[in-house]
Amino acid sequence: MAANTGMNLTLKIWRQKDAKSSGKMETYQVRDISDHMSFLEMMDVLNEQLIGEGKEPVAFDHDCREGICGMCSMYINGEAHGPDRGVTTCQLHMRKFKDGDTIYIEPWRATAFPVVKDLVVDRSSFDRVMNAGGFVSVNTSGNAQDANAIPIPKEDADKAFDAATCIGCGACVATCKNASAMLFVSAKVSQLSLLPQGQVEAKDRVQKMVDQMDKEGFGNCTNTGACEVECPKGISLDNIARMNSEYLKASTK
Ligand code: SF4
Ligand code: FES
């Protein structure tokens, strides 16, 4: 018989049947976990074990498993996406943990992200913020200008690109003591306001997106900066300053 060479871990996981039920932490043991596994692969091992025992697997969101889709929201040992920096849960490796560890796994906690089941939360509030103004309207009537014909300073293009790397994961909201969505919304506002194509609707956009953010029940920003630390894509607080200045310009039009 092969020797047990992996880690044995205790998992304390939030279990909640549905949005209306109250949840609680449950304890599970997993054995022989390889340090090469991703955190989600470890969760897969647990779920296979639970299914084998005739129990309900733990519901969690995931899709790309390569840091792109922003689905794998999990609070791990009190940190959004776990103890590593600049990674999502699907990019977190089990080598960050050691044999015998107890790991606490919870859903995002924010009024605007209600728990749907276990670790799955409803992040459609972000979609509604985007629908309120996170787009550019383009004339496609046959005389559309080639985008390359509009010169854009390299520095602006770089800043817009950096803002566009936000994957909408919600770690910023989950980390913020006020559950503020300012980092997310400011990244989306900045991405468009830095480019000439985004100027036409700039004033309406920032007002509508901020209004929707407030309607969804996100909290205020008190400049703590925890969001920037936990953001897997390194979205800068500079975007919040830019959004505030865009909002001020729009309010004094
Ligand atoms: S700003 Fe960062 S933490 Fe917030 S949604 Fe975007 S990628 Fe996630
Ligand atoms: S599963 Fe897509 S970012 Fe983690």
Image (tube, rainbow, N blue to C red):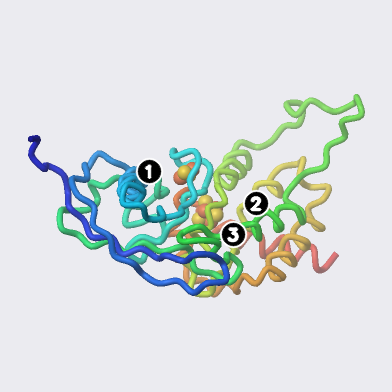
Residue shown at 15% from the left, 58% from the top: 100
Residue of label 3 = 122
Can you see residue 92? no
User: Within 10 Å of the Cα at label 1, are there few (<14), some (14-19), or many (20+) other Cα atoms?
Assistant: some
Instruction: Please say if 158 is above or below 15.
Output: above
Can you see residue 213? yes
* Residue farthest to the front, as pictured: 54
Secondary structure found at label 2: helix
Residue of label 2 = 188
Amino acid carrying label 3: it is Asp
Residue shown at 18% from the left, 45% from the top: 32
Instruction: Please say if 248 is above or below 65.
Output: below
C-alpha span from label 1 to label 3? 22 Å
Residue shown at 44% from the left, 40% from the top: 65
Q: Between disc 3 and disc 2, whose residue precedes? A: 3
Residue of label 1 = 91
Residue 35: x %, y % from top left: 22, 43
Name the quarter where the C terminus is drawn. bottom right
